[in-house]
Image (tube, rainbow, N blue to C red):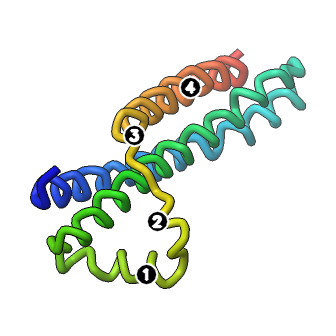
């Protein structure tokens, strides 16, 4: 892969990290609302498992995009094409977690699929919770 392609990939997946952040913000109230609805209404405690899955998948959406972005940045730096605006991020990762930076791998398909699964589960659970509160 060329240095320009790696820098472009870094920029794409660095932006995709924010999708995971947004999904996490959307998923955060769902387990709380499920517990409240189960306590106050019909006791559907089994909904707590997929509600916690919304949090896990949204964090996974951030994590896979982050790992792919950092992997691309690391590879671009090895080719001598480190973007100046991303140099501080790479320096921070090297100082904080150098062994993790070396162990990173590229997961572009998962970086796109996990947010889709997370958004689907968040939407499904949101409808379930809305139905519990609306009934």
Q: Give how far apart the Cα atoms at labels 4 and 2 are.
A: 32 Å
Q: Which residue is mark 2?
A: 102
Secondary structure under tag 3 reads helix
Q: Give how far apart the Cα atoms at labels 1 and 4 are.
A: 34 Å
Left/right placement of residue 1 relative to residue 134 reads left
Mark 1 nearby-residue class (10 Å; few <14, some 14–19, many ≥20): few
Quadrant where the C terminus sits is: top right
Quick check: 31 above or below 63? above
Mark 3 nearby-residue class (10 Å; few <14, some 14–19, many ≥20): many
Quick check: 76 above or below 86? above
User: Which residue is at 54% across, 44% downward?
Assistant: 60
Q: Give how far apart the Cα atoms at labels 3 and 2 are.
A: 19 Å
In this rendering, the label closer to the viewer, 1 or 4 = 1
Quick check: 25 above or below 3? above
Q: Give how far apart the Cα atoms at labels 4 and 3 are.
A: 16 Å
Secondary structure under tag 1 reads helix
Q: Which residue is mark 3?
A: 111
**Quick check: marks 4 and 2 in contact, CB under 8 Å?**
no
Secondary structure under tag 4 reads helix
């Amino acid at each position: 892969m060329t240095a320009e392609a790696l820098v472009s990939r870094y920029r794409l997946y660095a932006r995709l990290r924010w999708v995971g952040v947004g999904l996490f913000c959307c998923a955060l109230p769902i387990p709380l609302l499920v517990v409240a609805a189960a306590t106050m209404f019909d006791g559907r405690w089994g909904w707590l498992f997929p509600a916690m899955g919304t949090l896990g998948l949204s964090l996974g959406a951030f994590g896979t995009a982050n790992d792919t972005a950092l992997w691309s940045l690391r590879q671009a730096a090895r080719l001598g094409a480190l973007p100046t605006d991303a140099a501080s991020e790479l320096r921070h990762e090297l100082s904080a977690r150098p062994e993790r930076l070396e162990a990173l791998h590229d997961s572009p398909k998962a970086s796109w699929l996990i947010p889709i699964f997370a958004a689907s589960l968040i939407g499904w659970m949101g409808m379930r919770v809305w139905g519990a509160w609306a009934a």
